[in-house]
């Protein structure tokens, strides 16, 4: 019987800080990076995954993933893939590793990476893209994947089953629509803080011409700049065109309220990450104060327990999952179920390294089999670094086209992994590593 | 001018799982461990600190601390020690490292370790124990240490100053009392889940005879066992003797309510960690349901932002700081100020490796200069592993005696560090590393 023989981790970093791609009010000079995991079986099959980081510390994230190797080494492949719910609970529940979170930060993302690599392996084994593999599961198989611990005051297994059963209605129509038109995307490409006004306007125009029906701007560094940039964007895109704004956790409550009062005349669609992702009560307070402006967060929300409370406390209008922040596909399924229960749209965070490739599967699964809705939903898209992936996302007329290749989308090109390996890859030898160390 | 030349980290683990010392409902077989940091200056001065973990992953925690070396290497010692508030904000705010939390888990504890090693260096430089160094600071100097980001909706700099000014009254009397009688301790030594009933009763008797006025029992694995053990403890200690219980996050809301209904007849003093430390709203719900039983948590609360919300939401009656979970002394001062504002007693978590040695300083500072109160306050004490420290805690008549040696208490004996280094130290070579890897 084939077994898992081990895993290897590469510290891959892209020198994006040179161009200010990805710059925002909290992250002025990110070097987009991936702690990139390859899991191997005794038959030579492989599963791939990654954790996205923005530079320094990618070595720590890599070490955390490597530390989980003894947990998977020697396991029977088929038995493991047949019970990824059990594996996930066991790994995330490991008492000694759990102490380092619990269920948050470096160690939790490492567990998520291992779980996601097993999903990638399973997808290749079953010859399906992840979104299709998940939509082909029965409601019972789906709830078996979920850890309901710390959720049962809001969502129990039976209720999750009911949500999934209800989503059977209209499923074939949604599947056909998804295959024909894809999943709506929005673009953040025009809106980075480091860009000039002229570049902002030009990229907004490009976005509209490419068919995007929703764009996002970074805010939070300087209020006068933000007013000017949002006004320019509103003039360029016209009345009613959805333009979201994103403060990347820059504010306290009162500061958020003051700042947003200056920006609401330009009718932003949502304010994203107004404050710390840990601050459920502050999000709720800001939301009450700035209504009807929508409040969104999630890309750095640590786990299902915090998402549960954001929903309980009426703190958000839009829930933003991230493919590599939480404990893998399983925990993201729990979060999709929570959002569905509260009727809150999921608009995932993407960009970075591979996040578009990964997260598209989760929302495609969501629209077909969980929430059953695409209303008020867009998946973020940033035109960054896709060329380093085996199966880069395909965007057509402002939508993600459903992937057909087997896998979760995480596999990178071997040449890219080698060239951007930090600090020894040839790209880093040529640009120099001093400032990123 | 002397500079910081670097830091070294040792992965130190004690094979405590062999004896079931430290066993509880979530952590059945901990190997108490420390990612142990030594920071050096160009003059040969040293500062020490550690992060407590329970085994697997101590290598990851060590790697995270090591990754912060470039952040401190080459800094001027005096300028750094004179502005530990600035250093702390800069380190915790580093945008690239911050992505790995933010402000939580392995990376945040690593930042806390570096900050605490600088405090240890400063204590040695000024020839004072930490508690005395802190109490000798002016209110302005203390608030300069605090990062009020994400706190200002509840606590601003001016209000923190008022709290500290108010604590000047009666300060000399409290200082004299502290020097004479120490800080009240409670003991968890009798209450580990792995112990027999006979051992439980014997250790309870010992605790009372040693002068402890408060004890704690672990619960949460089996309700019938818990009822029996708590009944035995109540019989042994008598009516009115405070006996706390600790579930180590074992329950969901409804489960906690059911379980506690069985235990309240034996009048526990508080229920500690009934559920996930991330779940502010669940703590609030449980507290409403089990009142007047007090609810306590904190040893795994990730940062000041979550503590703030636990207080805002009336979710806890007792706040339990931990010396190595958050971003160091500075963030713990913020948490002490929050607790003082809400009038909630601080009863720190200790035990583990060095946590007693470290945390005693913070509550001694609290009683003299922040809350100004010792009412309803006890610092946890566990009789574990003190022999490995340069200045082990001194317990007399159930109280922590105020330390007089300079430092934060973190320095371990060099022989212990060498013997318990994992996996190459002689103790591990003799007991074998297989099960802990």
Image (cartoon, coloured by chain):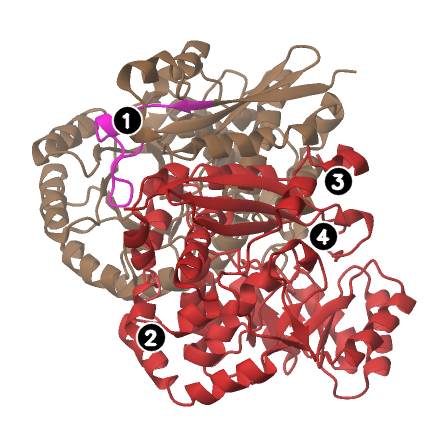
Chain colours: A brown, B red
| Marks 2/1: CA–CA distance | 41 Å
The disc numbered 4 marks a residue on which chain? B
Precedes in sequence: disc 3 or disc 4 = 4
Which residue is painted at 46% across and 57% down in the image? Answer: B120
Per the model, the C-alpha gap separating discs 4 and 2 is 37 Å
Host chain of mark 2: B
Q: CA distance from mark 1 to mark 3?
A: 47 Å
Tell me the element at label 3.
helix
From the image, state whether disc 2 or disc 1 is nearer to you. 2
As helix, strand or loop, the secondary structure at mark 2 comes to helix
Question: Is A196 in front, or is B243?
Answer: B243
Question: Mark 3 and 4 residues: CB-CB less than 8 Å, in contact?
Answer: no
- Res. A16 mark: 1
Asked whether A56 or A232 is in front, the reply is A56
* B78 horizontally vs B63: left or right: left
Q: Residue furthest front?
A: B43
Q: Which residue in the structure is indicated by mark 3?
A: B427
Residue that numbered label 4 is attached to: B27
The residue at the far right in this view is B198
Subunit bearing disc 1: A
Residue range of the region highlighted in magenta in the rendering: A11-30
Q: Is residue A149 above or below residue B366?
A: above
Question: Do tags 4 and 1 sit on the same chain?
Answer: no
Q: What secondary structure predominates along the stretch shown in magenta? A: loop
Mark 3, Cα crowd under 10 Å, few <14 / some 14-19 / many 20+, is some
What residue did someone put label 2 on?
A: B160
Secondary structure, mark 1, is helix
**Is label 3 or label 4 in front?**
3
Could you confirm whether marks 2 and 1 are on the same chain? no
């Amino acid at each position: 019987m084939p077994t898992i023989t081990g895993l290897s981790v590469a510290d891959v970093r892209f020198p994006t800080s040179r161009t200010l791609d990805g710059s925002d009010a909290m992250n002025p000079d990110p070097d987009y990076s991936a702690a990139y995991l390859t899991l191997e079986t005794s038959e030579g099959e492989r599963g791939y995954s990654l954790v996205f980081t923005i530079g320094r510390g990618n070595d720590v994230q890599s070490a955390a993933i490597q530390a989980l190797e003894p947990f998977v080494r020697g396991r029977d492949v088929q038995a493991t893939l047949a019970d990824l719910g059990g594996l996930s609970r066991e790994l995330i529940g490991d008492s000694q590793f759990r102490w380092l979170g619990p269920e948050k930060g470096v160690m939790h993302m490492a567990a998520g990476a291992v779980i996601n690599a097993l999903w990638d392996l399973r997808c290749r084994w079953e010859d399906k893209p992840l979104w299709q593999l998940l939509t082909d599961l029965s409601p019972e198989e789906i709830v078996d994947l979920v850890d309901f611990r710390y959720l049962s005051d809001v969502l129990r297994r039976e209720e999750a089953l009911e949500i999934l059963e209800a989503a059977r209605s209209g499923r074939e129509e949604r599947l056909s629509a998804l295959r024909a038109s894809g999943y709506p995307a929005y673009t953040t490409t025009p809106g980075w803080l480091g860009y000039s006004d002229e570049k902002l306007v030009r990229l907004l125009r490009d976005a509209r011409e490419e068919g995007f029906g929703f764009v996002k701007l970074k805010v939070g560094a300087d209020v006068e700049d933000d007013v000017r940039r949002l006004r320019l964007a509103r003039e360029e895109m016209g009345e009613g065109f959805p333009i979201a704004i994103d403060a990347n956790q820059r504010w306290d409550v009162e500061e958020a309220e003051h700042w947003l009062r200056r920006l609401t005349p330009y009718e932003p669609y949502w304010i994203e990450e107004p404050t710390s992702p840990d601050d459920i009560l502050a999000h709720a307070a800001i939301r009450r104060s700035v209504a009807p402006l929508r409040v969104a967060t999630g890309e750095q929300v640590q786990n299902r327990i915090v998402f549960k409370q954001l929903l309980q406390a009426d703190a958000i209008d839009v829930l933003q999952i991230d493919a590599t922040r939480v404990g893998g596909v399983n925990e993201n399924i729990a979060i999709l179920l929570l959002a569905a229960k509260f009727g809150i749209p999921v608009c995932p965070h993407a960009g970075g390294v591979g996040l578009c490739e990964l997260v598209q599967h989760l929302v495609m699964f969501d629209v077909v089999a969980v929430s059953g809705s695409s209303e008020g939903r867009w998946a973020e898209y940033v035109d960054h670094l896709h060329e380093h992936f085996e199966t880069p996302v395909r965007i057509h007329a402002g939508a993600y086209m459903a992937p057909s290749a087997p896998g979760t989308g995480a596999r990178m090109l071997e040449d890219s992994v080698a060239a951007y390996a930090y600090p020894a890859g040839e790209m880093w030898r040529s640009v120099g590593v001093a400032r990123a160390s």
